[in-house]
Amino acid sequence: MPLTPYHLGIGLFLGLALFRWLDFPMLCIATMIVDIRSIAIYFGPFTGNLHGPLHTVFGGTLLAGVLATGMYRTKPLWNRLGAPFGLAQKRSLSRIVAASLIGVYSHLILDAIMHTDMQPLYPLSGNPLLGIMHLSDVYIICVAGFLFGGIFYLVHLYRWRRGNLQMTY
């Protein structure tokens, strides 16, 4: 993905569509944080392959575990930040772990479809997902995620303000 924020479209869409079952901030963070090393390489502090260890199933799974641990410990802070926007959720390890894995793996899948330098199953070489979709279709999916995520948020906010959603944290 040439622009990391495109991945956020998937996080917004899934996070709001599945708000009851997934931790929203975790999903949004997990869809983008995979590129932290790539950004450091792109802007100079590091060198190497843009899609390195965090862009593998093994590295991504380790990253998801670290993210889930951090989110579980800091969930009260995230709830204070999200409460005014109707986004506070009860702290649930299973929802946090699921959101972390789904966010990281969705990033890996989208990037594997697009980038020739990815080896998602490292140490096995190759990329079985490369080219299974046209690049424009991947972009459309990400932009549609933003649009539908925005619509879902407006519906969510409306229901929350009318008192039809219980926000417990």
Image (cartoon, rainbow, N blue to C red):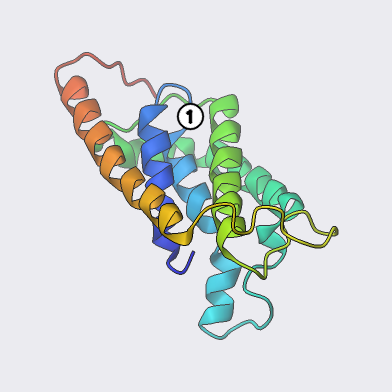
Q: Is residue 123 something one can see in this rendering?
A: yes
Q: Which image quadrant for residue 19?
A: top left
Query: Could you tell whether 159 is left or right of 137 in the image?
Result: left
Residue drawn at point x = 49 percent, y = 27 percent: 91
| Residue drawn at the location 53% of the way across and 44% of the way down | 103
Q: Is mark 1 on a helix, strand or loop?
A: loop
Question: Is 152 situated left or right of 138 in this image?
Answer: left
- The percent position of residue 139, horizontal first and vertical second, equals 40, 56
Q: Residue at x 66, y 83 (%)?
A: 47
Instruction: Give the camera-side residue of 14 and 69.
Output: 14
Q: Which residue lies furthest to the right in this view?
A: 123
Q: Mark 1 points at which residue?
A: 22
Vertical arrangement, residue 24 with respect to residue 163, above or below: below
- In the rendered image, which quarter contains the C terminus? top left
Q: Where 155 falls versus 115 (above or below)? A: above
| Residue toward you, 64 or 168 | 64
Q: How crowded is mark 1: few (under 14 residues within 10 Å), some or many (20 or more)?
A: many
Q: How many labels does the image show?
A: 1
The reply to whether residue 73 is visible in this rendering is: no
Give the percent coordinates (x, y) of residue 153.
Answer: 25, 34
Viewed as shown, does residue 132 lie left or right of 156? right
Q: Residue 165 lies in what quarter of the image? A: top left
Q: Residue furthest bottom?
A: 44
Residue shown at 53%/36% (left/top)?
A: 99
Say what amino acid the circle numbered 1 marks: Leu
Residue 54 x, y percent position in the rendering: 67, 60
- Figure check: 135 above or below 85: below
